[in-house]
Amino acid sequence: MSYNLFALMHQLLPLEFANKRAKYIRHRLYAIAAKAIKTGRKVIIKCQAQYYQLLTKVLNDIKAFKPLLS
């Protein structure tokens, strides 16, 4: 199951991560220091500016993902 989840994640990540190993992706994405703040009806993610664009792209790709139904 872990392999399948990683294979799915590979499809959703930007091209700069296409040929990278799980350890590299884990250190680059999962280890980003961020804070989730819930205000009213919004959830705001605060992080360093250098990671904001990367996180936005990954989150938008995950939201737009349409799984293939067999």
Image: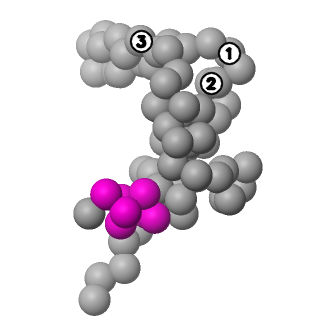
- The Cα–Cα distance between marks 3 and 2, rounded to whole angstroms, is 12 Å
Mark with earlier residue (3, 2): 3
Task: State whether the magenta stretch is mostly helix, strand or loop.
Answer: helix
Among the 4 quarters of the image, the one containing residue 15? bottom right
As displayed, is residue 10 above or below residue 70? Answer: above
Q: Which residues are magenta?
A: 2-8
Q: Position of residue 37 (x, y in %)?
A: 35, 11
Residue at 64% across, 24% down: 51
Tag shown at residue 37: none
* Residue contact at pointers 1 and 2, CB within 8 angstroms: yes
Q: CA distance from mark 1 to mark 2?
A: 5 Å
Q: CA distance from mark 3 to mark 1?
A: 13 Å
| Amino acid bearing label 1 | Ala
Display coloring: one colour
- Identify which amino acid the numbered label 3 is placed on: Lys
Question: As rendered, which of 69 and 43 lies closer to the eye?
Answer: 69
Residue 30 shows up from this direction: yes
Q: Amino acid at mark 2?
A: Tyr
Q: Secondary structure at mark 2?
A: helix
Query: Badge 1, how many Cα within 10 Å: few under 14, some, many 20+?
Result: few
Which residue is tagged 2? 52
Location of residue 30 in the rendering, given as x and y in whole percent from the top left corner: 46, 31
Q: Quarter of the image containing the C terminus? A: bottom left
Classify residue 3 as left or right of residue 12: left
Of residues 13 and 18, the one nearer the viewer is 18
Label 2 Cα neighbours within 10 Å, binned few <14 / some 14-19 / many ≥20: few
Which residue is denoted by mark 3 in the rendering?
A: 35
User: What residue is pinned by disc 1?
Assistant: 49
- What residue lies at 59% left-to-right and 41% top-to-bottom? 24
Q: Residue 63: x, y in percent?
A: 43, 51
